[in-house]
Amino acid sequence: VQLQASGGGLVQVGDSLRLSCKASGFAFREDDWAIGWFHQAPGKAREGISSIQLLFGNARYEDSVKGRFTISQDDAENTVYLQMSDLKIEDTGVYYCAATEDSDSRFEEYNHWGRGTQVTVSS
């Protein structure tokens, strides 16, 4: 299983950005995989912010991003996206995507990780 996050960059407060997580080594609609997005702000621990159960497309969001971020999947491209809108200074950090074979996993149980992509939000 390999995951590669991309799409980060430097944006201003209120801007939008779309991150991509390209996955390989498993099929989105087989078994019970889930992919999650995680945010690590400077000097802070990494935390899960959103996930999607790939078989049925069920998504969940943490309160910090609810209403601003949207997670989606493209089965043909084996890619999960994180559309980020109304970005805030506190959204700055490294964003990682990770996968788990059990969609009921808690964020801390995700066990397949890719490299992160940096998002910087400036005022």
Image (tube, rainbow, N blue to C red):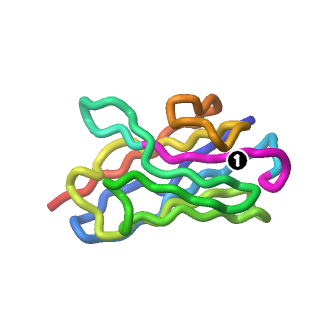
Q: Position of residue 84 (x, y in %)?
A: 41, 64
Is residue 55 shown left or right of residue 8?
A: right
Furthest-front residue in this view: 104
Tell me the residue at 24%/30% (across/down). Answer: 43
Residue pictured at 60% horizontal, 51% vertical: 21
> Viewed as shown, does residue 78 lie left or right of 60?
right
Q: What residue does disc 1 label?
A: 23
Q: Check if residue 34 falls in the magenta segment.
A: yes
Query: How many marks do you count on the picture?
Result: 1
Image coordinates for residue 16, horizontal then vertical, percent: 36, 70
Front residue of 89/8: it is 89
Q: Quadrant of residue 79?
A: bottom right
Please report the residue visible at 55 percent of the width from the left and 46 percent of the height from the top: 36
Magenta-colored span: 28-38
Q: Is residue 48 shown in magenta?
A: no
What is the x, y in percent for residue 46? 39, 33
User: Looking at the image, is 46 positioned above or below residue 118?
Assistant: above
Residue at position x 35%, y 51% in the image? 119
Rendered image quadrant of residue 13: bottom left
- Compared with 29, 102 (above or below) is above
The residue carrying pointer 1 sits among few (fewer than 14), some (14 to 19) or many (20 or more) residues within 10 Å by Cα, namely many
Query: In the visual, does 26 lie left or right of 63?
Result: right
Is 84 placed above or below 4 here? below
Q: Disc 1 residue type? A: Ala
The residue positioned farthest toward the left in the image shown: 123
Q: Secondary structure at mark 1?
A: strand
Q: Quadrant of the C terminus?
A: bottom left
Expressed as whole percent of the image width and height from the top left, the position of residue 111 reads 62, 29
- In the picture, which quadrant includes the N terminus? top right
Q: Quadrant of residue 55?
A: bottom right
The residue lying toward the viewer, choosing from 42 and 34, is 34
